[in-house]
Structure formats: C-alpha cells, structure tokens
Amino acid sequence: MDAPIEITPTVWQLPFPVGHVYAVALPDDGYALVDTGLPGSAPAILDALATLGGRPDRLRQIVLTHYHLDHMGSAADLADATGARVLAGALEAPYIRGTAPEPTPVLTPAERSLHEGITARLEAVGTPPPRPVEVDTVLHDGDTLDGWGEPVRVLHVPGHTPGGIALHLPESRLLFPGDLIGTDPDGRRAVLGPFNVAREQAVASFRRLAAIDDVDTVCVPHGVPLRTGARDILAAATPDTDWR
C-alpha cells in the first residue's frame, strides 16, 4: 500500500491495488474506517493510521459499505486488534456475520471476463476468504452516524448487494458511495460498479447518489476519487449502458 493521500483535512485515502480504504479523523482524537480492504490488509491499515497519529486503540468505528471480499476482508482482524465497533446496513449484516450465504451477482458478458480475471489473480496469490465479524450497529436509510464531528447521513443503496450503504457528509460535500460508483484511471468518468445482484436496482441507486446536490468529492473504492468537477462527471454518467 502507498502512503495515505489526504482528501480533506479529516479524510485520507489508503490506496490498495484492489479496494481502497478511507480513514476519517474523529473529534475525540479517534479514527473511523470506511471499508477494510482484502483479507490480510489489517497490518498495512494500522501502519497507515500510525502515520496519521492514530494508535490502534484510537480506531473507534469500522463502517462497511457491503459484504464483498475487498470491503469486509480485514474487518474481523481490525476489530480484534483495536476493539473498534463494526457498522453496516441492516440487510447486509447476515452476510457479514456469516449467518447467511452471499447472493450471487448476475454478470453481463463484459463483467464475466473481468470477474474471472480478478478471481484468478486473487486465487493465485492465496487470498483467503474473509472471516465473519459481528455487526455491532445495523444501519438504515436516513440514519446518522455519531461521533464524526459533522452530520453523516446513511443512504440505503441496494442493487450492487441487497443491503449496501453509502455515506453522505453534506457539510464537507463528500460522498462515500461504496461500489455503486467507480471511476476510470484518469478520474474523468464515473461508471456503474460491476458485479451487481440486481442491475436495475443498482442503476437506480447510482442515479440517486448522482442527484445529490451538495457533493464535490466522491471517495470511490475503485478508481480515482473525484475531487474536481464531480457534479458534472456524475451528471454525464450513463450507468444503464455500462458493462453491457
């Protein structure tokens, strides 16, 4: 993992080859994470927090946007190491806890080859499955998160997974969209994230996020965060034709 990248004075991207993690400074000198990367990422994440001045016991919250391998992969290790509480969407909690089988994505032909390639690369390096982890707080649409120093609105955005969530910080004009929104390598185009369990729902959720007025920064898990021109880029997106 490369060094943390400052997005705002309180938000940093922890860049990984697959599935970026975001660290958020909290007003009590603690930190929150949005997602946790692949299994095995915990040491690198804790090292990154240390460079920001955060000891392990200062990690207070782990917010999981959804259950996929590259998002919940290190949540159990981080929770064990730090005592942080895990938060996730109510409909997502059974998959994260390991009490229900994960739904199978419905792949388009374009997605199938990409999915096979990613799966083969992860298997080649011996990536283990994620360990289930307890969800301490289940989240619903319209909930707000405590302890972040500014309002954080939870949005239920199904389609990529049944219970995926996004986080909107109106004062910072910042959005954590989960995998619904990705970007190209130049950060000039926003696309619908692939591997959805319900494509039409995912497109509707993408459009809901794209319609939020007070967003200047979009912290995507895959691609380059949108930091300039985000509103125009989202308005120009065509999620219904992506990955056909």
Image (tube, rainbow, N blue to C red):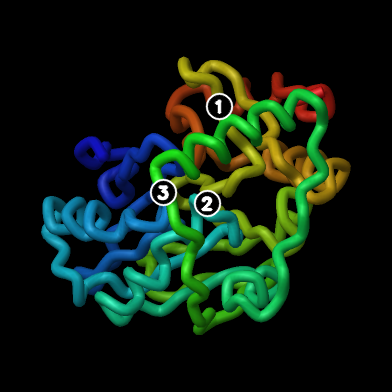
- Mark 2 lies on a secondary structure that is loop
Task: Indicate whether 130 appears above or below 8.
Answer: below
- The residue closer to the viewer here, 238 or 111, is 111
- The residue closer to the viewer here, 64 or 152, is 64
- The residue closer to the viewer here, 14 or 171, is 14
Mark 2 or 3, nearer chain start? 3
Quadrant for the N terminus in the image = top left
- Mark 3 lies on a secondary structure that is loop
Q: Is residue 34 among the parts visible in the rendering?
A: no
Q: In front: mark 1 or mark 2?
A: 1
Q: In which quarter of the image is residue 193?
A: top right
Q: Which residue is drawn at 11% across and 59% down?
A: 53
* Residue 39 percent location from the top left of the image: 40, 57
Q: In the rendered image, which residue does mark 2 sit on?
A: 170
* Residue 98 percent location from the top left of the image: 61, 76
Q: Residue at x 41, y 72 (%)?
A: 76
Q: What residue type is labelled 2?
A: Pro
Q: Which residue is drawn at 63% across and 59% down?
A: 165
Q: In the rendered image, which residue does mark 3 sit on?
A: 126
Q: Do the residues labelled 2 and 3 touch (CB within 8 Å)?
A: no
Q: In front: mark 3 or mark 1?
A: 3
Q: Distance between the Cα atoms at labels 3 and 1? A: 27 Å
Q: In which quarter of the image is residue 66?
A: bottom right
* Residue 56 percent location from the top left of the image: 19, 70
Q: Do the residues labelled 3 and 1 touch (CB within 8 Å)?
A: no
Q: Distance between the Cα atoms at labels 1 and 2? A: 21 Å
User: Residue 183, labelled with which disc?
Assistant: 1
